[in-house]
Image (cartoon, helix red, strand yellow):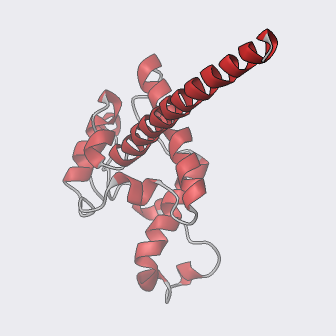
Amino acid sequence: MSREDSEKADFDAVIKRHVWRLIGIGAALGAVIMVVIFSGYHLGGFSYFCGSCHSMENIYFSWKTSRHKQFACIECHMPRDNVAYAVAYKAYAGIRDLTGETMRTYPFTIKLTGHARTIANSNCLRCHFSTVENTPMAKGSPECMKCHRFLVHGRPVEQGGNRFE
């Protein structure tokens, strides 16, 4: 065997030994990353997690005294139709909320965006459709928030008045 063949055989042996080690390290790292992502997604589904941010305290405590306190925040505020879309929307909303909390750019009175209002409205109808289906609201696209927007979270503190309508 020539010196060149000997060096190539040694190199192949070293690569084989390290490749399996690298594959093992990569698989372990991938598993840890997946556990962290799954745990974060799961933790983000608990209402106490949503209420842990300073800007959400009033909203969280008004929800805890509402008639909807048995439902987690995600049951009303996250899309329910498609799992992939729900994960993507939760990531988007979480990053937006984290940025607002970190940069302290949340307004004193937090309002739903148009898209978030559509999601919440569809979740209202998912639970309350049997109540709405025989009313004039069922024709077209009913907008639950027009009449019931303060039902769960009460009136914003700065507006005063009754907390619940």
Position of residue 66 in the picture relative to residue 127 (left or right)? left
Q: Is residue 37 left or right of 3 when viewed as pictured?
A: left
| Camera-nearest residue between 8 and 49 | 8
Above or below: residue 16 compared with residue 137: above
Q: Residue at x 56, y 66 (%)?
A: 81
Number of numbered callouts drawn: 0
Quarter of the image for residue 15 reads top right
Residue furthest out toward the front: 1
In the picture, the quarter occupied by the N terminus is: top right
State the image coordinates of residue 59 (x, y, percent, origin top left): 31, 42
What residue do we see at 41% from left, 76% from top?
128
Residue 103 at what x, y percent from top left?
46, 17
Q: Is residue 121 above or below residue 105?
A: below
Residue 39 position in % (x across, y down): 36, 43
Between 160 and 100, the residue placed more toward the observer is 100
Which quadrant is the C terminus positioned in? bottom left
Q: Nearer the viewer, residue 116 or 26?
A: 26
Q: Residue at x 49, y 89 (%)?
A: 134
Is residue 160 at all visible to an observer of this figure? no
Image check: 122 left or right of 62? right
Q: Residue furthest bottom?
A: 134
Query: Residue 112 appears at what percent x and percent y?
Result: 50, 45
Which residue does the image show at 47% across and 31% down from the upper left?
29
